[in-house]
Amino acid sequence: MFVLVTGAAGQLGLSLNHLVDQNSPNHQFIFATREALDLSDFKYVRNFIEKKQFDVIINCAAYTAVDKAESQKVEADLVNHLSVKNIAEIANDNCIKLIHISTDYVFDGSKHESYDETDHTAPLNVYGQSKLDGEIAILSKMALNAIIIRTSWVYSKYGNNFVDTILNLTQKKEKLTIISDQIGSPTNAKDLAGAILSILNNNKFYEDDILSEVFHYSNDGECSWYDFAKEIANISGTKCVISPIDSKDYPQEALRPKYVLMNKTKIQNSFDLKIHFWSDSLKTCIQDLSTSSK
């Protein structure tokens, strides 16, 4: 199988690249960065994909600057919606299977219990709306052969993310205040990449004309950003004092949902996945960071 991975320079793309050799020996991958494959050039993208004759596309590319999106609606929509629509059209025209990554920010957080894939969506911000529009575009263009995976609070040993930020800040500062009234589930990109490769290696994925579906994936358990930061500090052994703060006392450009947990039973049962608890995966990430820095 010939597989295209877009967004290759991002956290998930890099995590996939790190894992493929030992986990997918029967697949050939091309990892395309933004510089190599500009998804906003719709005609070029079509020509590239059709010339290479891919069997699968894993779309990791995304505009993820949640606050900036409030003032960059056109840019967010181009990457998260219109480019996704183009990929879906190409995939459908050429019988290519598609795995696309979306977000828990399609929900408003008002349910107060875990969200199923079929629950009502109501994004609170431009980023969430652009990602939802991308989902809708896929499902409207591809009745078959597409998998959409919503995930949340993604971090990794690569690039700038919450774990990297907290590790740096706790080394420089004696005190930090972190939002404590937004609850979700952190996701180690390494685990998400492993789940995607498990799907890629599952015979169910290659059945003829599988119905396009939405799935939820994150690490298990729940925490606030404050809890998350405290655990990062605890694992890394820093002495920085971290205190909680309410969202109202830390104004941001984009509204965030207060409580979004996603029910992952469907993806676990469909592809026989084992999902790690969030703090266990966090330890693994910090250990990986420590090893790579030596």
Image: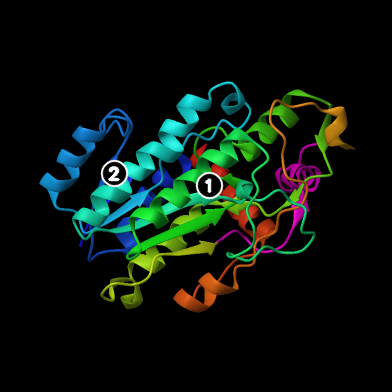
Of residues 243 and 249, the one nearer the viewer is 249
Q: Tell me the mark number nearer the camera, choosing from 1 and 2.
A: 1
Mark 2 lies on residue: 31
User: Whole-percent x and y of residue 109?
Assistant: 74, 51
Q: Quadrant of residue 28?
A: bottom left
Vertical placement of residue 279 versus 5, above or below:
below
Residue at 48% from the left image edge and 34% from the top image edge: 63
Closer-to-camera residue (99/179): 99
Q: Position of residue 36 (x, y in %)?
A: 25, 31
Residue 266 relative to residue 84: left or right: right
In which quadrant will I find the N terminus?
A: bottom left
Mark 2: which amino acid?
Phe
Is 144 situated left or right of 28 in this image?
right
| Cα–Cα span, label 1 and label 2 | 25 Å
Residue wearing tag 1: 132
| Residue type at tag 1 | Leu
Q: Is residue 194 left or right of residue 68?
A: left
- Residue span colored magenta: 217-241
Q: Judge whether residue 240 can be spotted in this image.
A: no
Label 2 secondary element: strand
Q: Name the residue at 78% across, 45% down.
A: 182
**Who comes first in sequence, dot 1 or dot 2?**
2
Q: Does 198 appear in magenta? A: no
Q: Which mark is residue 57?
A: none
Camera sees residue 236: yes
Residue 222 vertical placement versus 105 (above, below) = below
Q: Is residue 220 above or below residue 186?
A: below
- Local crowd size for mark 2, using a 10 Å CA cut-off: few (<14), some (14–19), many (≥20): some
Residue nearest the observer in this picture, 200 or 283:
200
Residue shown at 74% from the left, 27% from the top: 252
Kindly indicate the quadrant of the structure image that contains residue 261. Answer: bottom right
Q: Is residue 236 magenta?
A: yes
